Amino acid sequence: MNLNEKITVDAEPYPFEFVPATCALLIIDMQRDFLEPGGFGEMLGNDISQLRRTIEPNKILLAAWRTNGLQVLHTREGHRPDLGCLPPVKKIRGRSPTTIGDVGPMGRILVRGEAGHDIIPELYPVFGEAVIDKPGKGAFWSTDLHAIMQNRGIKQLIVTGVTTEVCVNTTVREANDRGYDCLVPEDCVGSYFPEFHDMGLKMIKAQGGIFGWVSHSEKILTVLK
Ligand code: TIU
């Protein structure tokens, strides 16, 4: 397969054309605190199984991306240990007794350098894959993601990770405004709330693909072979 040639993957609202060499896999916030039993997400009463079902398809897609020598980017949501980049409103919203920056089940919650902030072992980054630490929901805001994409010639994105309607949706919208195509494989994204997951995907592909395309990892794997 010539990785510099356009290939087409079945998607909604219509087939997605991409050049593998310039299309990065962007894996959003697959962090221990969001996905692991006993983490911050579960501590807040969320059903982590809705997120954990995305681990296996992400693992397979990531392996295929690596096998083909394609570009991979990871993000983590979190804050400086001094919490200088944590807006006070973000800390107090939710009214939980334990909030961002406090000591949680896996270290200080969503603080860089803490165990719970790190990426789950199943999808752990390898050398050469950029890890973007982001203080917000979108991966572009207050990060060097856009510079990295320009420096590495990345023109399109396959966006996976959690959660569908929060960080994935925000990132897809940000990418769209910067002129990038985004394809979201539905089995590789998840939400604590199935109905928000469904609507989050519908919002991306509505109106002729107002923010991008939605497909399935198996369809991407088929065309990569
Ligand atoms: N990564 C991400 O989506 N962060 C969140 O806080 N998501 C929620 O759904 N809460």
Image (spheres, grey):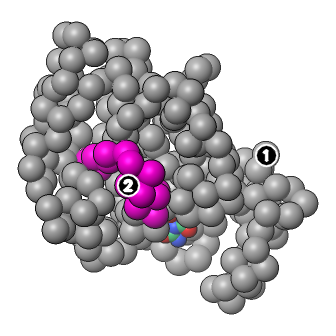
> Which mark identifies residue 176?
2
Residue at the bottom extreme, as displayed? 95
Disc 1 marks a residue whose amino acid type is: Gly
Residue sitting at x 53%, y 77%: 45
Residue bearing mark 1: 113
Mark 2: secondary structure: helix
Q: On the picture, is 68 further left or further right than 213?
A: right
Name the spot of residue 213 as percent of width and height, x first. Answer: 22, 52
Q: Nearer the viewer, residue 125 or 129?
A: 129
- The residue shown at (9%, 50%) is 14
Nearest to N terminus: mark 1 or mark 2 = 1
Residue that extends furthest to the right in the rendered view of this protein: 82
Q: Give x and y (percent) for residue 178.
A: 45, 51
The reply, left or right, for residue 146 in relation to residue 168 is right
Task: Select label 1 or label 2 by which is in front.
Answer: 2
Q: Nearer the viewer, residue 182 or 82?
A: 182
What is the three-letter code of the residue carrying label 2?
Asn
Asked if residue 200 can be seen in this view, the reply is yes
Quadrant the N terminus occupies: top left
Residue 31 seen from this side: no
Magenta range is: 170-188
Which residue is at a point 20% across and 59% down the rendered structure image? 209
| Mark 1 surroundings within 10 Å by alpha-carbon count, few (fewer than 14), some (14 through 19), many (20 or more) | some
For the residue carrying disc 2, how many other residues have a C-alpha within 10 Å: few (<14), some (14-19), or many (20+)?
some
